Image: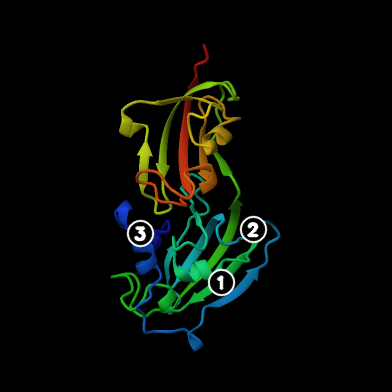
Amino acid sequence: MRYNILKSVFTFTIAGFFLFTTSLLSGCDSGGSTPNGELIKEDLTVGTGAKAEVGKAILVSYVGKLEDGSVFDQSDSSDTTDVPLSFTLGLGQVLQGWDEGIPGMKVGGTRRLTIPPDKAYGRNGVPDLIPGNETVTFDITLDAVIEDVFIRDLAVGDGATVKNGDNLTMDYVGTLTSGQVFDSSASHGQPFQFVVGSGQVISGWDLGVVGMKVGGKRMLIIAPPFAYGTTGFGSIPPFSVLTFVIDLRSIDNP
């Protein structure tokens, strides 16, 4: 599975993004509780890298379990081509228990969060997946704190290397935290072209494509200040961490 449960509660129209995340993801209607009704945090491994703080873009992998120990969702860290889970911490884009339980972690660390229903999936749960009033447990590994652009090369090309000023032709797919595709070159019916460093695209692209080689495929995970920031744009909500998978077709300099 690939964060299916987070995606399932993220089934929404973009216009209703913040209403949905604050009401449904927080699970605020629950009547159940953990022992003492508290969010329980336990560090299984203490990281040594950058610290996760509210307002920061982060990248995580995780395993989610029900009270009986069965796994209801998990990321697939072995699949380097899959889009990982990234979001802005503390802004209601994920479960309330995550927003409250992750701050203070350091990159490389793994923390176990035991989350009461009122900070998880509430009194209704998720049909056929999570019972109502269920206390859930997540083992979360903090893979990165994204200050600007997180880069993962999915395939290294064998052509010319991109530098500032190059005119590129590429295909791309852009996704939100929910996994929903918000834009792609295919949706426009043709490859996309731009000049690197000219300000024609978001700054995360200008930073992230430098060093690619023609024929290569690269994943860019872009923090909000290097994408559409605090205001968003069109169907993209404010404070969105954006993921792009880019296939570089050619460098077409005059």
- The foreground one among 216 and 11 is 11
Q: Nearer the viewer, residue 100 or 161?
A: 100
Residue at the spot of label 2: 107
Q: How many numbered dots are placed on residues in this image?
A: 3
- Measured in 3D between alpha carbons, the distance from the residue under mark 2 to the one under mark 1, in whole angstroms, is 15 Å
Q: Nearer the viewer, residue 120 or 22?
A: 22
The label on residue 112 is 1
Closer to the eye: label 3 or 1: 3
Under mark 1, the amino acid is: Arg
Looking at the rendered structure, the kind of residue marked 2 is Val
Q: Position of residue 201 (x, y in %)?
A: 48, 32
Whether label 3 touches label 2, CB < 8 Å:
no
| Secondary structure state at the residue bearing disc 3 | loop
Q: Secondary structure at mark 1?
A: strand
- Determine which residue is flagged by label 3: 10
Q: Closer to the N terminus: mark 3 or mark 1?
A: 3
